[in-house]
């Protein structure tokens, strides 16, 4: 290989195509992980990339810094014909018990089996075990007595994998394995080793959890080397791990084929584990005709052995890139480069590694951690590169000064629920583009006439009280984490009273059902979205009925948030309205001659309230909102929003409600000398004719459509104050929530 830097080596191993599956992203992450190791101060010797790819240096990171977490046996192989046990650095015998440090993580050369059982030994000569000292000394003689200081010489060094590697190795390398096996065959030597170990503990019952490893002195060397510094040990580790990919849980899963990721004809295996619990070799139900026996198991999902190794350790790498969402839910956020190897240079590789990969990997995922902020920073950089300048908030219209082209960065997302088994609810190779489009559309929506100048919802409710009503919003993370839809929807009318936590994919998993649709390329069905909007409003209003906080018992803020969200989804082309109302809008002014002018423009600019029935419902809600504001000012406890809440209005009740609301408006005009019959004329002049234009029983509107338009009307009416100064009742009355 002509490369002479770690970055160049990594680029040479990149694929010459844009990733098209999570397996290719796993391969890309294996290169960043290798580069991380190759440039680490803890790796100051040449470790071949094909060996490093098989190691799991952080598999037992919980032992870093723990007392008695590293058991090291010393073997003097300087004369392979006459091998002996060596002398440890901290004791007079051939074994020592010390602390495993993070700087040791590469030298020990640990390769840990995914899903290891208690009797299974690790692929590497370094193995992990938690047991009593009697077991660790190799004195247990049953089948479960594996992973001890003796079977490093008797089991690992004499295994079929060691024999296979020895046959193909150079004589001087083969001699190292032969010397190790010779020590294992010497009963006196093994007894001496066991006695030396037991002399370091108080009793054979002492419990220890540690990595067990062997350091060797090679011919011509003055010092002892760790396993990863001995190439022949790495070869055996690699051979043992490769065999697991062909013979564990499957039979003869090796063949010659085109690699699924490498796209080259080479030896492949179908026996690799899956990613995130998907399509693992034991999950036969995912493959229609999975053959785990005979000569064709490799056809199920042919991966080259290097790629299969990368996939098998991807879980430990990916575990630094998820955000816990509670109830065993995880959202993996996996930025990657959409650059072909032929277009990639070492400088870009290093920039992505430092600015994206390493920044996110090192972010703290705790409650007060930096993971969320780091995700937002990455999303903002991508948004700044990919969006039109006019669609960006002013806060993002800047040059970040980075050398990385964020237009070549995408973010894969995986929503997983851990358990037995793990389940993936959805995954996407591009979790950013549509979330970014929705973010931009939402920022545009909250910068339109209803939210500006004399607009009906300008600072009413106040943007400070809502993550969905401000301007220059950065909502990507909020969308992907599920909060964007969780804030505005409920799956059923009694969701909040449910005692059981909803499972992923269940009916109550409303947080992520719309996110799944969004990031996987679908459109949200407006019919179900409106139903969930209504469920949210009904539950909030019921809670407010039981509250004595002094606010009008109507969830105005939630309605306005839903209104802004509908406008954003429509603008971004992410909602399917084929079976429901259209939520298209036309531009309107931000300054008005009167409240009548403002209402007229609002009606004319919204397709959803263009037809007579829809407009009648909206105006009824508006009148209910105006009268409610007056009642609250006058101290009337039984306001109209309490008498006619959101879920009261149906096709069967709307005529009755309209009649009573109009009568009440007239009654207040008669009783209050400061009011006139024309006080709410912008509503009352239009409402009767519209309501009588057709029998409500013949309307094509669904109940959810009817109730949501009614709610929007109430929110409008509660906010419909004088353009110059507030009405008396609005100035004194507490706002709706």
Image (spheres, grey):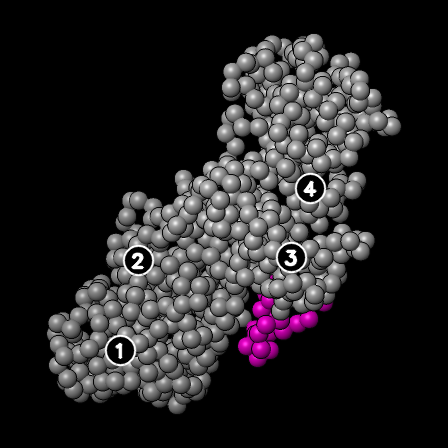
- Magenta-tinted stretch: 376-401
Q: Mark 1 or 3, which is nearer the eye?
A: 3
The tag earlier along the polypeptide, 2 or 3, is: 3
Q: Which residue is mark 3?
A: 356
* Quadrant assignment, res 732: bottom left
Q: Is residue 150 left or right of residue 626?
A: right
Q: Does residue 388 belong to the magenta stretch?
A: yes
The tag earlier along the polypeptide, 2 or 4, is: 4
Q: Mark 2 or 4, which is nearer the eye?
A: 4
Q: Mark 2 or 1, which is nearer the eye?
A: 2
* Quadrant assignment, res 341: bottom right
Mark 1–mark 3 Cα distance, whole angstroms, equals: 48 Å
Q: Percent from the top left, x then y, of residue 289? A: 39, 50
Of 659 and 276, the residue lying toward us: 276
Q: Are marks 3 and 4 in contact (CB under 8 Å)?
A: no
Mark 2–mark 3 Cα distance, whole angstroms, equals: 36 Å
Q: Which residue is mark 1?
A: 618
Residue at 60 percent across and 78 percent down: it is 389
């Amino acid at each position: 290989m002509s490369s002479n830097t770690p970055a160049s080596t990594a680029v040479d191993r990149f694929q010459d195509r844009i990733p098209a599956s999570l397996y290719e992203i796993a391969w890309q992450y294996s290169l960043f992980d290798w580069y991380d190791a190759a440039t680490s101060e803890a790796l100051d010797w040449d470790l071949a990339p094909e060996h490093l790819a098989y190691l799991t240096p952080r598999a037992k990171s919980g032992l870093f810094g723990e007392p008695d977490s590293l058991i090291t046996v010393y073997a003097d192989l300087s004369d392979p014909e006459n091998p002996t046990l060596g002398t440890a650095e901290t004791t007079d015998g051939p074994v020592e018990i010390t602390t495993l440090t993070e700087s040791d993580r590469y030298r020990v050369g640990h390769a840990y089996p995914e899903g290891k059982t208690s009797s299974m030994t690790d692929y590497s000569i370094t193995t992990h075990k938690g047991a009593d000292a009697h077991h660790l000394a190799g004195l247990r003689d049953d089948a479960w007595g594996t992973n001890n200081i003796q079977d490093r010489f008797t089991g690992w060094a004499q295994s079929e994998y060691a024999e296979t590697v020895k046959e193909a190795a150079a004589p001087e390398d083969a001699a190292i394995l032969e010397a190790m096996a010779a020590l294992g065959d010497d009963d006196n030597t093994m007894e001496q080793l066991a006695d030396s170990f037991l002399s370091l503990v108080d009793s054979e019952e002492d419990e220890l959890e540690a990595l067990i490893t062997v350091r060797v002195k090679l011919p011509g060397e003055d010092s002892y080397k760790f396993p990863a510094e001995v190439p022949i040990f790495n070869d055996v580790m690699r051979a043992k791990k490769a065999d697991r990919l062909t013979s564990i849980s499957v039979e003869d899963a090796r063949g010659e084929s085109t690699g699924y990721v490498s796209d080259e004809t080479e030896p492949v295996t179908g026996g690799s584990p899956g990613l995130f619990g998907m399509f693992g070799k034991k999950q036969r139900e995912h493959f229609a005709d999975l053959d785990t026996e005979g000569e064709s198991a490799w056809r199920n999902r042919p991966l080259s052995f290097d790629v299969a190794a990368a996939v098998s350790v991807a879980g430990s790498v990916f575990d630094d890139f998820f955000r816990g969402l509670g109830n065993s839910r995880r959202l993996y956020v996996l930025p990657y480069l959409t650059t072909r190897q032929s277009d990639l240079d070492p400088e870009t590789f290093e920039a992505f590694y430092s600015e994206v990969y390493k920044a996110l990997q090192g972010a703290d995922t705790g409650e007060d951690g930096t993971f969320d902020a780091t995700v937002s920073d990455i999303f903002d950089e991508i948004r700044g590169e990919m969006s039109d300048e006019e669609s960006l908030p002013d806060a993002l219209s800047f040059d970040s000064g980075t050398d990385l082209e964020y237009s070549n960065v995408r973010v894969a997302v995986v929503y997983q629920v851990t358990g037995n088994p793990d389940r993936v609810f959805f995954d996407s190779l591009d979790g950013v583009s549509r979330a970014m489009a929705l973010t931009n559309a939402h920022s545009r929506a909250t910068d339109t006439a209803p939210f500006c100048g004399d607009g009906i919802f300008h600072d009413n409710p106040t943007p400070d009280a809502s993550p969905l009503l401000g301007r220059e919003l950065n909502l990507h993370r909020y969308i992907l984490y599920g909060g964007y839809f969780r804030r505005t929807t409920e799956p059923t009318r009694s969701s909040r009273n449910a005692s059981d936590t909803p499972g992923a994919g269940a009916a109550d998993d409303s947080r992520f059902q719309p996110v799944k649709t969004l990031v996987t390329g679908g459109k949200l069905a407006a019919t179900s979205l409106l139903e969930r909007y209504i469920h949210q409003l009904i539950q909030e209003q019921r809670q407010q009925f039981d509250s004595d906080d002094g606010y009008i018992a109507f969830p105005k803020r939630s309605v306005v948030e839903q209104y802004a969200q509908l406008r954003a989804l429509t603008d971004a082309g992410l909602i399917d309205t084929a079976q429901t109302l259209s939520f298209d809008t036309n531009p309107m002014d931000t300054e008005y001659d009167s409240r009548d002018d403002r209402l007229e423009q609002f009606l004319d600019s919204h397709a959803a309230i263009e037809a007579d029935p829809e407009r009648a419902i909206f105006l009824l809600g508006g009148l209910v909102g105006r009268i409610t504001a007056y009642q609250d000012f006058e101290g009337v406890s039984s306001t109209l929003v309490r008498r006619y809440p959101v879920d009261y209005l149906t096709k069967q009740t709307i005529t009755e409600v309209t009649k009573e609301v109009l009568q009440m408006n007239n009654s207040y005009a008669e009783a209050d000398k400061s009011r006139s019959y024309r006080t709410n004329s912008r509503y009352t002049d239009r409402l009767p004719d519209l309501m009588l234009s057709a029998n409500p029983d013949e309307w094509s509107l669904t109940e959810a459509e009817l109730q949501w338009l009614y709610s929007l009307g109430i929110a409008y009416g509660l906010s419909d104050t004088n353009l110059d100064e507030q009405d008396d009742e609005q100035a004194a009355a507490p706002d709706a929530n």
